[in-house]
């Protein structure tokens, strides 16, 4: 076990799905996995390991923001040997052609900075998704019936952002959406030579103010979880 993850050796699978919300981790495990076992509840950050179509998988909450993601992703990779990490989270759309409930595959993640920024000493490192996972996700997405967009996103640790001018610039440069964890996940995966991808559900729209009602979120997030599992393992055993 680590400081933040109470799982015993062998209780974490090599493939880990990472929602920000620990209760979403519980919902996804109960909905999609068989024989799901609670392997972590330290600080209420729930994690479950179970089986999806013959494949062993862990679903572990990451918390909100890059500092929290940095803790859980690093411990999963360094201490538990996780090889593939797929973020399944929500995001706010920045482009008019993207609608609430659409999915976004994050090809690259711009940011204001992350916990890893001091390592680069002024270099603007470009965190990107694992191409193999990105390609598989894009291919698998063609048959799910939910619109899927691929491109760059913005990762920000500020949920309430007063920089409307900066939001306009990233929109102008084609960023599809804004969320809070991907840039650091991709940076850590590159450092550890692991595979990472973020699959995001658009839960609200920055331009129009439209938001997905709370009682509809789990149903809409189901397509994202199914796509993440299919990306990691294919259609079955």
Image: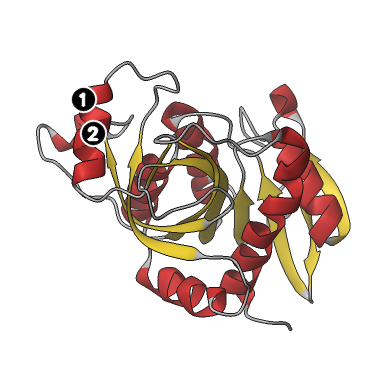
The numbered mark at residue 40 is: none
Q: Are marks 2 and 1 in contact (CB under 8 Å)?
A: yes
Q: How many marks?
A: 2
The residue closer to the viewer here, 232 or 216, is 216
Compared to residue 165, the image places residue 177 above or below, namely below
**How far across and how far down the image is residue 133, in percent?**
46, 70
Position of 33 relative to 235 (above/below):
above
In the rendered view, tell whether residue 176 sits above or below residue 204: below
Q: Residues within 10 Å of mark 1 (few under 14, many from 20)?
A: few
Q: Residue at 35%, 50% (x, y): give it.
A: 176
Q: Quadrant of residue 224?
A: bottom right
Give the secondary structure at mark 2: helix
**Rendered image: mark on residue 165:** 1
Task: Give how far apart the Cα atoms at labels 2 and 1 are.
Answer: 5 Å
Where's residue 155, x and y in %? 36, 37
Tell me the quadrant of the picture where the N terminus can be found: top right
Question: Does residue 154 appear left or right of residue 30 in this picture?
Answer: left
Q: Which residue is drawn at the image coordinates 44% and 53% (left, top)?
A: 98
What crowding class fits label 2: few (fewer than 14 Cα within 10 Å), some (14-19), or many (20 or more)?
Answer: few
Q: Where is the C terminus found, in terms of image quarters?
A: bottom right
Residue 26 image-quadrant placement: top right
Secondary structure of the residue carrying numbered label 1: helix
Q: Residue at x 86, y 52 (%)?
A: 30
Residue corresponding to mark 2: 168
Residue 228 found in image quarter: bottom right
Left/right placement of residue 151 relative to residue 222 reads left
């Amino acid at each position: 076990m680590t400081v933040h993850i109470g799982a015993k050796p062998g209780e974490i699978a090599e493939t880990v799905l990472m929602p920000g919300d620990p209760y979403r981790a519980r919902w996804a495990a109960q909905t999609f996995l068989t024989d799901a076992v609670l392997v972590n509840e330290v600080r209420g950050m729930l994690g479950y390991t179970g089986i999806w179509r013959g494949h062993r998988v862990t679903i572990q909450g990451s918390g909100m923001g890059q500092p929290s993601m940095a803790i859980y992703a690093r411990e999963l990779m360094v201490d538990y040997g996780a090889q593939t990490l797929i973020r399944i989270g929500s995001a706010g759309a920045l482009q008019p052609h993207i609608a609430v409930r659409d999915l976004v595959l994050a090809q690259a993640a711009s940011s204001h900075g992350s916990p890893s920024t001091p390592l680069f000493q002024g270099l603007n490192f470009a965190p990107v998704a694992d191409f193999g996972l990105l390609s598989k996700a894009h291919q698998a997405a063609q048959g799910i019936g939910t619109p899927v967009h691929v491109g760059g996103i913005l990762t920000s640790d500020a949920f309430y952002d007063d920089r409307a001018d900066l939001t306009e610039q990233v929109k102008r440069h084609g960023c599809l959406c804004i969320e809070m964890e991907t840039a650091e996940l991709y940076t850590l995966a590159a450092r550890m030579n692991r595979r990472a991808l973020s699959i995001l559900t658009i839960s609200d729209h920055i331009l129009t103010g439209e938001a997905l009602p709370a009682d509809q979120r789990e149903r809409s997030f189901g397509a994202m979880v199914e796509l993440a599992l299919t990306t990691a393992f294919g259609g079955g055993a």
